Image (cartoon, helix red, strand yellow):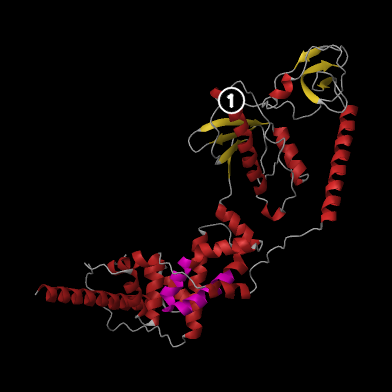
Amino acid sequence: MRLFTIHKESDEKKMIRQCVDHNPSAQRRLYEKYAGIMLGVCRRYMGNTEEAEEALSNGFIKVFKHIDRFEFKGSFEGWIRQIMVRECLMYIRSKKQSIMYTDTLEDFDTPASFEPELELDTEELLLMIDALPDGYKTIFNLYAIEGYKHHEIAEMLQISVSTSKTQLMRARKILQKGVEDLEESFRTLSNTNHE
Amino acid sequence: MNNIDKYFKKPLQNLEVTPSDKVWASIEDAGVIGKEKKAWVLPLWSKIAIAALFIIGMFSVAYTRLQDQLNNHNGSFIATADQEGQFGDDEQKMLPFVIDQESGDISEMEPPTFASEESQQENITKSNPEAKVKEMTLDNPYNNNSVALDSKLNELDSIQMLKSLPIQPLDNKNLDVLEVSIERAVADVSTDETPLFRVQIDPDELIRFADQNFGEKSTKDGLKLPTNLRDKLVVYAEGQLNQLADASGLKRLSKINEIEIIY
């Protein structure tokens, strides 16, 4: 005797199937569900909202064109997120051709231990990432935020694994210094106020 | 993971930014969004004509089926009567007893599993020997429904799940095919809390249903259940079980999450 379980189709699965059939209201629902979080993804890579929106709209066009390729394996959000990240990388490649992914290991040293006391808000963290050079920013986003591995990043950006590692170390170093500087300024300001 | 990575990842991973309206507009401009179907507005005369055709069609179907039933009876009959206890030809009501064709004996039928027509039964005079009998066949494969329930519902013995599932054309590309040989099919219907009902499905009925819906592919050695059927089974079971709950004075089920078919 074998057991077979019938599950009701989830609302999301139904919505995706309707999008495959070009149902406009389902497409609108899908957009409304994911547009905010995907613009957040694009915003981290692009550095400003206008360019992020351009990447977002191109990404959604691809999502709707190729939604029939989604095989209901893994999360749908993860699938969209992948498309958005690739769209951002393409955008960066096409519009910002001057990005250099250098591979020199000169000042390659491990950052000192980092245990911040100060809690920065999202906007401030985003500004610090925006201030990174494009190459560093991209690799930091891919590795630290999205969770890609160095060999995946190397393949996506067509660079070597060691370049990916170097750039990540430099990005971390800059960010760490930025947070420490901010902490120092707050400390100084607070001491001044006490005096 | 590095501390600095964690420090940035936590707040930024789920960062949400509300996009401006121009994003959706540019997606629409790209032509990837489907067109809204325009609602058809029919003139009044068309509506009347369609309604008339529909009524004529219904009468024709009913007449044909009645003729078929009269031609194919299997020896037992259901008698019909009007409101005063007289059996009329035009205005008929079902009687809850069986009349044997040959002996003319009248015997009481088992009450319907989900009786909701008690008011009709009250108006019927069971012992009227002068009753005019209208012959109708009981040769309906779905009249012998059987239900097996848990201890609370033992008196209601069984039901066949598939009798009124709507038959719709299926989109073959959505077929999620299950090929199994069936010996016995049982649907365990569970609520959010505990399993409450076990509904037996006659394998022959399951195959018959599959055949009606999906062509000639299903046999006892290979039943094919498309995704669409799964949903229909769940929806149908919800309706049936709520009827059972009503009939037994039990609390209605809020939602059925899954049905298990054991085969």
Which residue in the rendered view is the most extreme toward the left? Answer: A195
The kind of secondary structure the magenta stretch mainly shows is: helix
Q: Examine the image and state in which quarter residue A114 appears.
A: bottom left
Q: Is residue B227 visible in this depiction of the protein?
A: yes
Q: Is residue B127 above or below residue A73?
A: above
Residue B230 position by quadrant? top right
Q: Position of residue B223 (x, y in %)?
A: 70, 41
Residue at position x 58%, y 74% from top?
B25
Image position of A103 (left or right of B3) = right
Residue B80 belongs to magenta span = no
Q: Which residues are magenta?
A: A36-62
Q: Say which amino acid is labelled 1.
A: Ser
Label 1 neighbour load within 10 Å: few <14, some 14-19, many 20+: some
Q: Nearer the viewer, residue A187 or A17?
A: A187
Q: Give the camera-side residue of A137 and A56.
A: A56
Going 90% across and 31% down the picture, which residue do you hit?
B67
Question: Quick check: is A38 in the magenta stretch?
Answer: yes
Instruction: Say whether residue B169 is left or right of residue A50.
Output: right
- Asked whether the viewer can see residue B220, the reply is no
Pointer 1 residue: B248
Q: Position of residue B248 (x, y in %)?
A: 58, 25
Q: Is residue A103 left or right of residue B65?
A: left
